[in-house]
Amino acid sequence: MTISPTEDILLHACCGPCSLEPIRLLRERGIEPHIYYANSNIAPREEYEHRLETIRAFAQEADVAFTEGAYEPERWEATAGKVGEALRERAEVDTRARCRMCYRLRFEEAAAYAAEHGFARLGTTLSVSPYQYRDIIKEELERACDAAGIECAFEDYSPHYREATKRSRAMGMYRQNFCGCRFSDEEAQAERENRVQEQEKRARERAAREAEQQRARAERKAERAAYDEKQARKRAVLKELRMAAKADEGSELAKHAHENDVDELTGA
């Protein structure tokens, strides 16, 4: 592809959604980017093609120059993949070393292309994602640019992640749920499973709390019913006692009246 004089910067891009805000910001500053899609880390090939199709369609719609780099997953496996396997064998959870090698491979390729095609600067959209190691991205981009004799145009685009997410969803862009490599896919899947398990655990705990609350309410209700029943029996007994007392009192008065009548008649 012929490089236009207005294309001031080669912008390494990982995907379409992460390219939205960097391109907007660069253009607002009068800088016309040229997208370079160099991502041999993405696996499987179907995933790579899906992301490629998405960013290529966006570039065409936005009238941004676009170049696809070589897709060489075997090179990635020999570098970052090898590091990743070594970390997995040692059961290390820190992925920084693996990601560093992945950044290095892609930035070296992008920097070589930039130097060969007359770009003075190289940037990347990788820093959009808050899940990436931005400090390592900056270090590796500077390293690749120094080696190629070009200027490093690193920028932390992570403050614009939310807006990029909002815009990409509104545009109906394909959004991936893992970085791209097979390790990140496995880790994302494990994380999703952990979230599901955690959600199920919280649901069980919530159900247990609700069941306990219902049991407690039922127990209080039963206690109240028993108390009310006891009080009703007491009231009934008292009523019977009062009625009996009144009846006895009436009988005693009648007896006294009868005795008085007899006394008067007898002159006693």
Image (tube, rainbow, N blue to C red):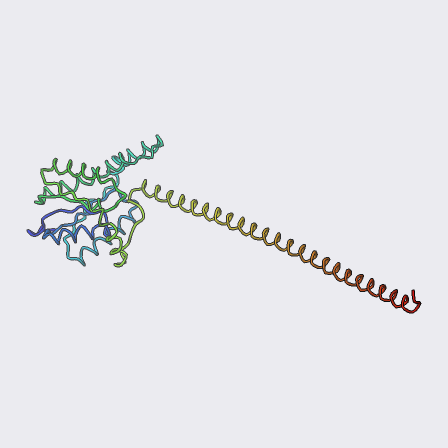
Residue 179 screen position, x and y as percent: 28, 44
Asked if 47 appears above or below 248 in the picture, the reply is above
Percent x, y for residue 225?
63, 55
For the C terminus, which image quadrant? bottom right
In the picture as drawn, the residue positioned furthest to the right comes out as 266
Closest to the observer: 51 or 31?
31
In the drawing, does residue 201 fall left or right of residue 166? right
In the picture, measured across the screen, residue 264 lies left or right of residue 155, that is: right
Position of 222 with respect to 102 (left or right) is: right
Q: Please state which of residues 145 and 25 is positioned toward the viewer in this rendering.
A: 25
Q: Residue at x 25, y 46 (%)?
A: 129
Q: Going by the picture, which residue comes out furthest to the left?
A: 5
Q: Which quadrant of the figure has residue 167? A: bottom left
- Which residue sits at x=12%, y=36%? 146
Indicate whether 150 appears above or below 168. Answer: above
- Number of numbered discs: 0
* 97 relative to 31 in the view: left or right: right
Report x, y in % for residue 221.
59, 54
Name the residue at the top extreme: 90
229 up-or-down from 200: above or below: below
28 and 174: which one is in front?
A: 28
**Residue in front for this viewpoint, 26 or 39:** 26
Q: Answer above or below: position of 135 versus 217.
A: above
Residue sticking out furthest to the bottom: 265
Q: Quadrant of residue 87?
A: top left
Determine which quarter of the picture holds residue 99. top left
Q: Position of residue 240 (x, y in %)?
A: 75, 60
Residue displayed at 18% across by 40% down:
107
